[in-house]
Amino acid sequence: MTSTPGTAPGTPPGGQSRLRRRAGTAAVAALLLAGIPVGAAVSADAGTPKTATGPKGQKLTVSATTGLDPAQQKVRVQGEGYGLTTGIYVALCKDNGDNRVPSPCLGGADMSGGSKTSQWIVPPGDPYEGDLAQAFGPGGTFDVEIEIAQKGDGLDCAEVACSVATRADHRAAGDRTQDVRIPVAFAGQDPGDGSGEGVDVPAGTVSYKSAADFTTAGKPLDLLLHPDSKKLYVGADNLPDTADVDERGLHVLNPENGASESWISQAPGSTGALRASAAARIAGPLPGDGVVYNYPLRGVGSAKSGDEAATGVWLAGSTITDIAPGTTPGTVLVAQGATLSEIERATGTATRTLTLPGGTQFAADPERGALWYTDFTAGKLHRVDLASFTVSGSFDLPGGSGGMAGFTETDPATGAVWVGVGQSVLVFDTAGTLVKTLVGKDLARDAAFDTASGRAYVVWQDGGDLSDPANDNNGTLTVYGTEDFAVAAQDLSLPGNHSQAGAASLAVEPGGATVFVTSPAEGKITKLVRQVSPLVTRAPADLTAKEGEEVALTAEAEGTPEPTVRWQVSTDGAQTWKDVEGATESALTFTARAAQDGYRYRAEFRNDVGTTRTAAVTLTVTAATGGDTGGDVGGNGDASNGAGSTGSDGSTGNDGGTQSSGGSTTGGSDSTGGSGSTGTSGGSTSTSDGSGATVGGGVAGGTGTAATSGGGSLAATGATVMSVTLAAAGLVGAGVLVHRRARRRTEGAL
């Protein structure tokens, strides 16, 4: 929440406002004389103090606000106009928006007097004045230094918006009138994008919501979203609740609505005869369409949408416990307990076989030529080299010994192996080093990866034993970043998803926009869609304009669903806000009026997920200088022989472009210009005496340099002066546009 230094917003023009306008005009003039080209952008210096005005007219100034040292930065904080009845804390805090306490703060609430990261300021004569706190100076002033850092005391300014702020001390914690905030950014952060102030959830919050439940595939056991055909393949068993139909087999669903497109219920058994068979595990996709899968007990089959029955082979040996694509086309890797084999799908012949110390489950990483075999009983993880088909390493599985088997999956992007054991997920790197342990409140049952976004999706399933107080029948979907393992979306509760009737499984659409989760106990597949609360991508900035100029504030945000926008205005220093009627576009355009000096504006973005507002910006309206800057001035004055006549055809600059004849004198003919001459400048009369000519008038005396149209000249130098309006157009900040004065006035934004 920033504002232009000066009087409190809403103060009528006059008094200090006029001083501020003069200062603003002087600043623009200085830029003109410095020769700043039209269109040049002016950016704030990190060392330049920044000032904000509080709800009671307080003024807070911070010496540096951008490019701060993340490790430690000393800043000077000054204030004036604070009340002399309430103590305040000065600190770096999480910025929670208007009318919300800035918290947590670096250094906490300093009541010891020894903190360098926060300061306590109290009224003169306060019992705490002295070693614990310092007193306000005359006029409610203070001047302190604090040491701030990007992270500490529960605050991380790399993750949340932070401001140097004042707030009422612990004796008046509910008093929001002392809240004054100045946003800061540390090195590496972009201070200009501003994610906005999330009202109900933080800006840019990612979450998932249930969009549909598919109940067309019996008791779902495994899922695969085909990369080519985009069809959803479901390995299913029979659901006892529907005794009239045996739903075992491979189901093919339309992922949009769950409609059944195909159902392959038959597969060859031990004698080669077709029989009704469940599809237990899906190994992987076939080119174009179709999948390879395992059907109980030892069947390896393949089928695609539209097939009447699967083709397959029946293996010798024990029950298949896991399956994955082989190292060459036409082969699959199969685990039969502790035995790993690579077999030909057409014949069932094993081309390679390896017996491990133990285990039942594995995950293949063909890109890196590795396979990870888990032995939950012994608490071991074995790495198999796929080229030599030998064990190349064995590693401890912490907590795995005797733990409930969950899953083993590899991240295709990094090669890391994720192992679900009981209520934990253990993440190992490609060297077999445990790099992270993720702990949930339920059982870790399956994981899927989206390489496009670098996200890992883990489904946690409740134990389902209601005699255990820790169980509630509800599972959870959690999304993690695969690089930092940070939670990348709000956890989603999965009501009724428990493990009593089988393990849940996952499928993720590339990009992560849609996720499918099975619930075997309920006989359904839940389709989840991603949603994102509005995140501001372009924010307005404080703006100074002359009365009568057309101004535009621009703000943009992204989110899912696409957010709507409405502009709001505050006439009382951001204490109350109201919608600007009809302002529902990204740009708010209106004609500045004197009464709007000090008004604050913000854009509010909304979607189904939440509401996000841009920081409030302040409009400063300066006095108009008169006529239209687009009018012709100076005309064709004849300055030869030092004659004192002014140019004719000098426009008064009125909107209609009224012409008037420049004044003429018969004063002295010497080079000093003799007696003064007059000329109009933007509709006002000015007099030159001697060699000087006024901007906008004809040249009187002097060197005889002709005045230029629209700008006049500097006397005796001929240096052209750029118009203030063009200079203002050159000072275009992020999201703020200043246009030329409108020739026809429009109604202002309140």
Image: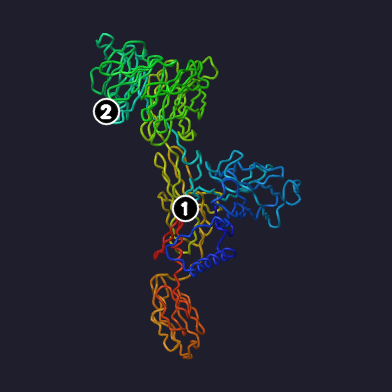
Q: Residue furthest front?
A: 388
Would residue 424 appear left or right of 413 to someone viewing this image?
Answer: right
Give SS at disc 2. loop
Rendered location of residue 127, percent (x, y): 76, 46
The amino acid at mark 1 is Pro
The answer to whether residue 125 is above or below residue 713 is above
Would residue 233 appear left or right of 355 to someone viewing this image?
Answer: left
Q: Is residue 540 visible?
A: yes
Q: Alpha-carbon neighbours of circle 2 within 10 Å: few (<14), some, or many (≥20)? A: few
The amino acid at mark 2 is Pro
Residue 186 or residue 191, whichever sits in front: 186
Rendered location of residue 88, percent (x, y): 67, 47
On the image, numbered disc 2 is attached to which residue? Answer: 287
Residue 295 or residue 536, whichever sits in front: 295
Q: Alpha-carbon neighbours of circle 1 within 10 Å: few (<14), some, or many (≥20)? A: many
The dot on residue 655 is none
On the image, numbered disc 1 is attached to which residue? Answer: 540
The answer to whether residue 472 is above or below residue 677 is above
